[in-house]
Image: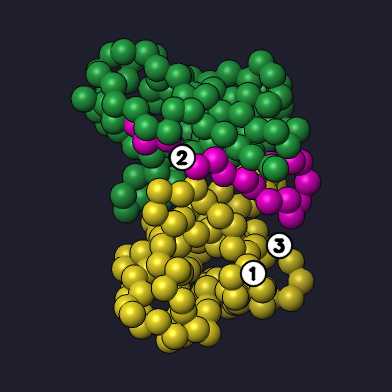
Amino acid sequence: EAQVTQNPRYLITVTGKKLTVTCSQNMNHEYMSWYRQDPGLGLRQIYYSMNVEVTDKGDVPEGYKVSRKEKRNFPLILESPSPNQTSLYFCASSPFGEGNTIYFGEGSWLTVV
Amino acid sequence: AQSVTQPDIHITVSEGASLELRCNYSYGATPYLFWYVQSPGQGLQLLLKYFSGDTLVQGIKGFEAEFKRSQSSFNLRKPSVHWSDAAEYFCAVAGGGSSYKLIFGSGTRLLVRP
C-alpha cells in the first residue's frame, strides 16, 4: 500500500530540547516536503527536496532543518524548539511529472511547552 | 505571488442538501488546482485536481469542481451531502513551473446537520 509515514504522531516536548520528526515514503518518489498547519492559516511549506541531497527552503523555514540522505526518508529537525513551533506537521511526497498526485502523511501533532 | 482564498470559515448544511464550497485563487497563468479533505485526526486526502482540459472536474466521493478562469474560482460542489462528509476542506494552487509546491487556502470546516 502506498504510504507516507510520519513519527511520532503526537509529541509534547519542552523548549530547547532537540527533536526529530521522521518521514518515510514507500513509493520511490523523488519529491518530498514538509508543511505545518495552523488555525486560520491553512498549510504552509517549511522545506522541500527534489531528490537525494537536494533540499531547499519553503515559505516558513526558520527554526527547522531537514536532510535527504536516502530517497525514502526526509526527517524534519527542530534543533531548539520554541512554543511558536507548536503545530500540526505534514510530510508529503510526489513523483516527478505534471499531473501527479501529492501524497500526505497522517500528520504529527507537536506541542512545545 | 500566488494565493488562495476560502472565504467561508465554517459552513453548515443539512444531510441530503447540496453543497458548494468557494475557492478563489490569484495566479498569473493557468494554475494547477486541487481540493483536499481532512477528516478529524486524519491526514489530507485528494478529492480532485485540475491541470488542463475540461473545466468541470469529477472527483472521489461524489464531489466535483468547476474551474472558471474569468472569476479566478475553483468551487467545490456536491449534490447531496452525507454525514460522513463533515470535515475540513482545503483548496490549493500550484504553479510557477512547479506542480509540487502547494499554496493552501485557510480551509472551510463543513458541519452536517442530521
Q: Same subunit under labels 1 and 3?
A: yes
- Check disc 3: other Cα within 10 Å, few if <14, some if 14-19, many if 20+: some
Query: On what subunit does the disc labeled 3 rest?
Result: B
Please state the horizontal and vertical placement of residue A50, each as a whole percent of the image.
69, 31
**Residue wearing tag 3:** B51
Q: Position of residue A77 (x, y in %)?
A: 46, 19
Q: Which of marks 2 and 3 is in front?
A: 2
Secondary element under disc 3, as helix, strand or loop, is loop
| Image-based side of B47 in relation to A101, left or right | left
Q: Magenta region: which residues? A: A94-110
| Residue for badge 2 | A107
A69 sits left or right of A33 in the view: right
Disc with the residue nearer the chain's start (1 vs 3): 3
Q: Which residue is labeled 1 in the image?
A: B59
Of all chains in the rendering, the one displayed in yellow is B
> Element type at marker 2?
loop
Residue closest to the eye, A63 or B48 = B48
Q: Do the residues labelled 1 and 3 touch (CB within 8 Å)?
A: no
Marks 2 & 3 on one chain: no
The quarter of the displayed image where residue B15 is located: bottom left
- Foreground: A2 or B28? A2
- B98 relative to A7, above or below: below
Q: Label 1 is found on which chain of the structure?
A: B
Residue A15, magenta (yes or no): no
**The disc labelled 3 sits on which kind of residue?**
Phe
Q: Can residue B90 be seen in this view?
A: no
- Give the residue type that dot 2 points to: Gly
- Residue drawn where x is 46% and y is 55% of the image: B38
Chain where mark 2 sits: A
Label the green chain with its letter.
A
Mark 2 Cα-neighbour bin, 10 Å: few <14, some 14–19, many ≥20: many
Residue positioned 62% across, 45% down in the render: A103
